[in-house]
Amino acid sequence: MKSATSDKASLPTVRKLRRIAAAVTTACVLATSTSAWAKPACYSAAEYDAEQAVRLHTELMVIGLTCNAIEADRKLFSKYQQFTTKNRTSLMNWEKVLIGHFRETDKSNPTRRFDDFRTVVANEIAQRSALLTPPVFCQTHSDIVDRALALSESDLKRYLADSRTDEIGKAPPCGVTVAELLDSDLPLTATKASTKPSVQGKGNDAKKAKPAKDAAAAKGGSAKPAKTIVTAAKVD
């Protein structure tokens, strides 16, 4: 029988999977629920780390609940509880930081906004499990619980800080407006969002200009698919 701990994805690999899933989810929300978003906001470094901590903690909970019976010998939900106890003070502080961010952007009920945010994150992860099927999800994600539990307090904070260039958030770090989030070979980069469409040439020249994909085809090479660009904004 194949070992439950074999062929598991590393944290960086799972980061890429999470980034793709979150980017697709964010793009759908942007396309269908724009009216539900508050005015654009950005995260300070502390707020961004706080969101990533809440995302990680929520992911550990879903993994523990989903995989506890499938990989019973690993006691994953118990390890999630151990992680919570071990990092209780830091987790409480991160929750306060994130609630503080919601209070600054919408004073109506920041605590409820935090609860709603965490519910959305949990549902996103649960949907990922359903799409992969629980056995596959557990095979590729259960090691995250062990790795997270093994992190010291300083290692955990370093991991969250490193994720600023690797993860998507509901709002970008301050100074970032547009990110090429699906290109795993590029770091998260900040660009100034343009309100003007890109135009090739002027006047009659614009009509004669060939689309980029036609030019690539003329050279005999296959055109690369365009990167998905996600504009990060404050949600709900």
Image: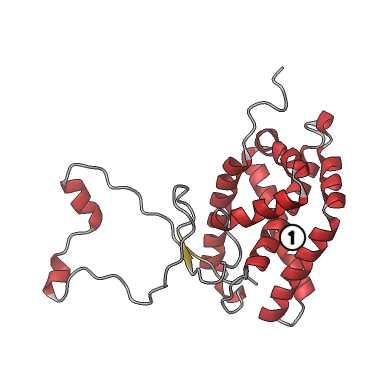
Residue 111 falls in which quadrant of the image? bottom right
Q: Quadrant of the C terminus?
A: bottom right
* Residue nearest the viewer, comparing 151 with 104: 151
Q: Quadrant of the N terminus?
A: top right
Q: At x 61% / y 77%, what residue is drawn?
A: 38
Horizontal and vertical percent for residue 37?
60, 74
Asked if residue 115 shows in the view, the reply is: no
Indicate how the structure is coloured in the image.
secondary structure
* Residue nearest the viewer, comparing 192 with 18: 192
Is 203 situated left or right of 52 in this image?
left
Asked if residue 179 shows in the view, the reply is: yes
Horizontal and vertical percent for residue 6?
67, 26
Which residue is denoted by mark 1 in the rendering? Answer: 119
Circle 1 SS class: helix
Q: At x 57% / y 64%, what residue is drawn?
A: 29
Q: At x 82% / y 53%, what residue is drawn?
A: 87
Residue neighbourhood size for the residue with mark 1, other residues' Cα within 10 Å, grouped as few (<14), some (14–19), many (≥20) = few
Residue projecting furthest to the bottom: 107
Horizontal and vertical percent for residue 162?
60, 53
Q: Amino acid at mark 1?
A: Thr
Horizontal and vertical percent for residue 124?
66, 53
Give the vertical position of 169 relative to 214 (above or below).
below
Is 31 situated left or right of 171 in this image?
left
Is 36 situated left or right of 150 in this image?
left
* Residue nearest the viewer, comparing 175 with 203: 175
Give the vertical position of 66 relative to 206 (above or below).
above
